[in-house]
Amino acid sequence: MIDLKTLRENPDLIRNSQKSRGEDVGLVDQLIAADEARRVAVNEFEAVRTEQNLLSKSVGAAKGDEKAKLLESAKELAGKVKVADAKRTELEEAAKKILLQISNIVDPATPIGGEADFKVLEHIGTPRDFSAAGFEPKDHVELGKILKAIDTERGAKVAGSRSYYLTGVGALLEFAMVNYAIQLAVKAGFIPVIPPVLVKPPAMEGTGFLGQAAENVYHLEEDDVYLVGTSEVPLAAYHMDEILDVDNGPLRYAGYSSCFRREAGTYGKDTRGIIRVHQFDKVEMFIFCKPEEAAAEHAKLLQWEKDFLNAMEIPYRVIDVASGDLGSSAIRKFDCEAWVPTQNAYREVTSTSNCTEFQARRLNIRHKTDEGTKAVATLNGTLVAIPRMIVAVLENHQNADGSVNVPTALRPFLGMDTLLPA
């Protein structure tokens, strides 16, 4: 959540941020009014509570008729305290409800606009000229059949649309990518984690996934738990309600988990293959650090993502995501998009977001400062999302006979340098 001090001192900053996101600017004025009403209610409660405490001391020292009168006054005052407490609670909840609807304050460096208004920061590698190689590239679905690596038909039969099996070399390719990613992360100082994929509401709400992203979340109503769409959620909540020691450097975790997304609102979009699916595995990086270190950590996360993509030997570009396409928690987000030959387009394969103190305030994760405890900053970055990375590797490294050359970095994990037709 945003800092209420910023709201009181610079509401226009938040209004402009809401506007740049294409979100409700009126929420800012609603929150200002709700915050003021809450503060008045808190003062009123504290005043009658102080009066009650003073009266209680007087009762203890009084005798006879005086004590009887004081006891009567105390009874009346207790009723006022109860009413004031209920009013305070009601207004605090009302203010918090509005506060949770306001997104993080967009970084001034973020491009303004919608999904198509991103800024390309760099291109790495050159898309392969398949015509010069003398053949038309096959898409990952056809290659998956030739290699007996991807089975979407049986996936749909067993689990419904947007489901798949990875079999044979397809499964081995996932294990190779995950092992390489974890190895890279550990060398960079990340602690490997296999987190739960079922979380309670506070973890999901605390990371900002019950707002604009709620429609894509699987909720198990009977147990009131959620299936995570990214291990960002359990990693962020790992230190919920804790005071962290980040004086000696950031805390970095790399979580491997299955992820679940309903893909609501994507009817007819990417229905072929495994680009947009309901369940997939991913290695996610997550960082807790001092707020003043967040921008530098964000740059590092992007570089680690680039290191992985460079190792996959595929062309890609880095984009600065526009304000209207940011998640509610992020102030700035970079995407890496791999070249997909059969689509003649770049498609997102990794992203990294700087969430500053937004999630930590919700999750009550703090660190000690000279001015008392304050919220830490949190950042996240996908090191590898398996299905899309498999798509990129298969399509970019394919040969005319349907075989696929294995990127050098993955060969020690696969034990082969070419995936051959089965």
Image (cartoon, helix red, strand yellow):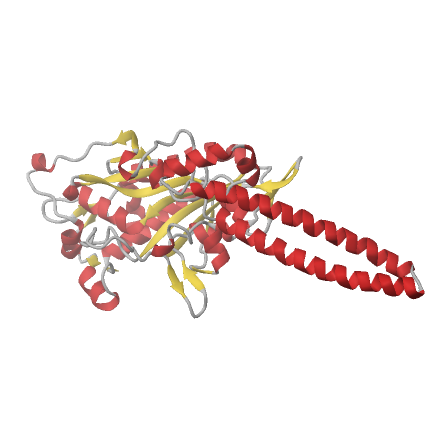
Left or right: where 158 falls relative to 210: left
Towards the viewer: 82 or 262: 82
Q: Quadrant of residue 84?
A: bottom right
Which residue extends farthest left?
Answer: 134
Q: Quadrant of the C terminus?
A: bottom left
Is 24 placed above or below 148 here?
above
Where does the image place residue 12, in percent across and percent down from the top left?
Answer: 47, 32
Q: Quadrant of residue 151?
A: bottom left
At x 52%, y 48%, the residue is 362
Left or right: where 117 falls relative to 145: right
Is 315 placed above or below 179 here?
above
At x 82%, y 53%, the residue is 54
Is 170 placed above or below 33 here?
below
Where does the image place residue 280, in percent across and percent down from the top left?
Answer: 31, 55
Where does the image place residue 198, in percent across and percent down from the top left?
Answer: 43, 61
Towards the viewer: 118 or 244: 118
For the image, the number of numbered tags is: 0
Where does the image place residue 375, in percent across and percent down from the top left?
Answer: 57, 42
Left or right: where 58 falls relative to 306: right
Left or right: where 308 falls relative to 200: left
Is residue 290 visible in the rendered image? The answer is no
Which residue extends farthest bottom?
Answer: 222
At x 54%, y 49%, the residue is 95
Is 17 placed above or below 269 here?
above
Is residue 272 visible in the rendered image? The answer is yes
Towards the viewer: 56 or 253: 56
